[in-house]
Image (cartoon, rainbow, N blue to C red):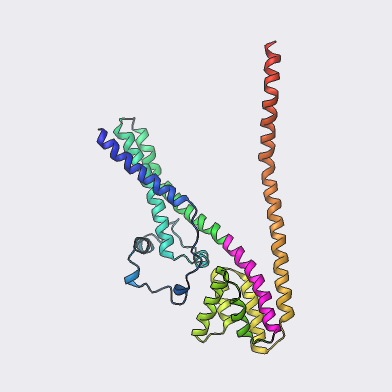
Amino acid sequence: MWPFALIIGAVAGLGLTLLIFELVPKQPKLSAALERLGTTTVEDVSTSRDINSLLGSWAQRHLSGISGFGIPARDLSLLNITAQTHLANKVKAAAAGILALIVLSAVFWLFGLPPLFPAVPAIAAVPLGLGLAVLVDAGVKQQAVEAREEFSRAVATYFELVAAERRRGSPAQHALSEAAGVADSWVFRRIRQELLRASLQSQMPWNALRELSEEIGVKELRDLADIMQLSGEEDAAVYESLRARGKSLRSQMVTDEHQEGNKQTERMTVPMTLLGAVFMAILITAPLLTLMAV
């Protein structure tokens, strides 16, 4: 009996470890220049035989129709996470939850507990697994929200840099590439990758930026593409338009940050009120007990 219990305990520990590992927030891979230069639909067999690729490919073939195993394409594209990797993370999270509850059910059964105790974890295993898979989506969504905000802030600066290049008399295409080379943040690296891809494919840079805007869901980049297309195709003076749009973006971001700060302050009102009530209750408890004892 004891060897079986030890084995089951070890497996349960492994399952809980995998569960905790999947729930810990991970840093997104925000730069993958070489991958972005090629197509994302063709897999190289020689380099894709790792666990994540194999598990993700299997999940994409067999689990894509199941609720909870969808692919948030825009968020993944923004974070430079492949669909296979995302699906693999979801499968591992679901498997960890199911394994942990099944092991718990087996432990209850081995120790001779009433049938209800082993039955409850076994029944809850699959719903928990699906719930953990959805949590992986929620984590990616939160990372994408933060990354998209950072991207928008960088695009506001990009407006100013492109305006400065146009002010110096640079052609529209040259202004976009030169401005993108000023900074080395992940946002500017992503923009440079798209501009390089457009150059290699003989595509206009504003069309590449417009496609990137649609792909990752950053509408500010589309505004820049529209303005620069007007400058490149009609030789329009866009310096003031770029400066005005950049200033408008920064003002909107400051307003949004103030609103978010106000919301956070309002959320703290209830906990602080409860904390004050508990503190007052602690202060008056001793005098009340004294009065009651008299």
Is residue 7 found left or right of 279 in the rendered image?
left
Q: Could you tell me which residue is drawn at 50 percent across and 80 percent down?
A: 197
Is 163 located above or below residue 57 in the figure?
A: below
Quarter of the rendering containing residue 123: top left
Q: How many marks?
A: 0
Is 7 located above or below residue 166 in the figure?
A: above
Q: Could you tell me which residue is drawn at 43 percent across and 76 percent down?
A: 39
Q: Could you tell me which residue is drawn at 44 percent across and 61 percent down?
A: 86
Task: Give yes or no for residue 282 being in the magenta stretch.
Answer: no
Q: What percent of the width, then of the height, locates residue 237? A: 72, 85
In the picture as drawn, the residue positioned furthest to the bottom comes out as: 234
Is residue 246 found left or right of 75 in the rendered image?
right
Q: What percent of the width, then of the height, locates residue 46? A: 32, 71
Q: Could you tell me which residue is drawn at 69 percent across and 87 percent down?
A: 169
Query: Which residues lie in the magenta part?
Result: 146-168
Is residue 11 found left or right of 66 in the rendered image?
left
Magenta stretch prevailing secondary structure: helix
Is 232 located above or below residue 283 in the figure?
A: below
Is residue 80 found left or right of 290 in the rendered image?
left
